[in-house]
Every structure is written in C-alpha cells, then in structure tokens.
Image: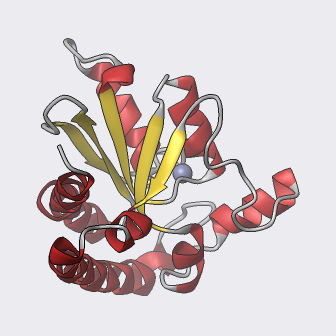
C-alpha cells in the first residue's frame, strides 16, 4: 500500500466514520474530537468513536475509543492496529495510547489548531503547566510509538495525488469549522471542567 493510499484512507475514515458520530456528540453538547482504529493489514475499520465528556471528562475521543475497544469481546491486538485521532492527542490521551500498547498514532489537526481554530487551549496549557514543555515539546518519535501528522503526509504525497488529498482535507476542515461553531455556541451550558 502506498503512503498516499494510507493518507486518503485515514481522511476517508474521518469523513465517513468519525464525523457522523461527532455530529451526534456535538448535538448532545460534547466536544468535536474523535478517533478510530484500523487494521494495519488492510486498513479496515475496527472502531470509531467520539468525545463523550458529558458522561465523564476523561472520555476524550481517544480514551473513549480505547474504552469501547476494551469492551469488544473479540478484538485485534493493538500492535496490529493504526490509531487515528482527529486532533493531536493531549497528554492524557498520548499516555493512554502508550499504556494500551499502540506503536503509532496519526492525527489531522495539531495542538496549535485546537488552540487557535477551535478555542480549545487545554492541550498546550497542560503541556506547559504540568510538564514545563513548549508547543511541540514532546517526543514525536520515541521508544513507544511514532506519531504522524496528516498534514505532513499530504505535503509529501506524489504530485499527481496531492491535489485530491488537499481537496479532501479542505472538506474536512470545513466540517470541523461547523462542528466547532456549534460546540462553542452551546458550551456555556455544560459543566465539563475544561470546556
Ligand atoms: Zn485527550
């Protein structure tokens, strides 16, 4: 499988599997973050989930996905899976991915996007306040996992395929713009600690 088809497939899972769940989640008052697990072997979907902080402030998109994953009776091994997160995982989720034994994660929006485009500054604030780290200060490649930013993957795609990926990415950004506006307009009503 080419790197481009992996990139296209991850974007497709965001559009077809994660965003529909997130639309329902945001309608209920939850945040816009989601995640999915795919088999490395054939890129088939194992599970997609979305943020559910209204139930429990620890149910970020990624941790909520892991919770559901461990509720599956017959589940693949984490080492055989790709972890896709719509947004760069926060330090809790990054650690959860580590503790669960995944050797990778892929994400579309960066911590800076979460702060600047989505008015969710908590990832970077926790990185700084708790760990003393500047933005980007954690080790993106380490003994546990390698992380990949879809933006980089799109930039590195073959010339013939980059345009289509950029169109797909633009469509995704627009949908998240709408979701974010909906979340932000209703968030004063929720009691999520870091909303
Ligand atoms: Zn998180």
As drawn, 162 above or below 83: below
The image quadrant where one finds the C terminus is bottom right
Give x and y (percent) for residue 187: 47, 77
Residue 168 seen from this side: yes
Of residue 42 and residue 181, the one placed in the foreground of this image is: 42
Q: Which residue is at a point 30% across and 81% down the rendered structure image? A: 173
* Quadrant assignment, res 79: top left
Give x and y (percent) for residue 69: 31, 27
Return the residue found at the far right.
132
Give x and y (percent) for residue 132: 88, 57
Return the residue found at the far top.
74
Of residue 134 and residue 34, the one placed in the foreground of this image is: 134
Residue 66 shown left or right of residue 20 in the figure: right
Of residue 44 and residue 16, the one placed in the foreground of this image is: 44
Give x and y (percent) for residue 178: 28, 85
The image quadrant where one finds the N terminus is top left
Of residue 149 and residue 57, the one placed in the foreground of this image is: 149
* Quadrant assignment, res 143: top right
Name the colouring of the figure.
secondary structure
* Quadrant assignment, res 82: top left
Return the residue found at the far front.
159
Q: Which residue is at a point 34% across and 55% down the rendered structure image? A: 34
How many dots with numbers?
Answer: 0
Residue 55 seen from this side: no
Q: Which residue is at a point 48% across and 45% down the rendered structure image? A: 56
As drawn, 51 above or below 45: below
């Amino acid at each position: 499988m080419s790197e481009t088809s992996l990139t296209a497939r991850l974007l497709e899972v965001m559009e077809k599997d994660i965003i529909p769940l997130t639309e329902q989640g945001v309608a209920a008052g939850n945040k816009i973050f989601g995640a999915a697990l795919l088999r490395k072997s054939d890129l088939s979907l194992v599970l997609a989930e979305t943020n559910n902080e209204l139930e429990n402030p620890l149910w970020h998109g990624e941790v909520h996905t892991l919770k559901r994953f461990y509720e599956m009776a017959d589940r693949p091994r984490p080492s055989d899976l790709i972890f896709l997160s719509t947004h760069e995982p926060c330090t809790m989720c990054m650690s959860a991915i580590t503790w669960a034994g995944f050797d990778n994660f892929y994400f579309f929006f960066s911590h800076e996007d979460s702060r600047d485009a989505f008015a969710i500054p908590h990832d970077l604030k926790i990185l700084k306040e708790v760990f003393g780290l500047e933005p980007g200060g954690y080790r993106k490649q380490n003994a546990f996992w390698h992380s990949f930013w879809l933006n980089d993957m799109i930039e590195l795609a073959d010339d013939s395929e980059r345009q289509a990926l950029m169109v797909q990415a633009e469509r995704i950004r627009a949908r998240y713009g709408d979701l974010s506006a909906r979340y932000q307009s209703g968030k004063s009503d929720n009691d999520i600690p870091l909303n």
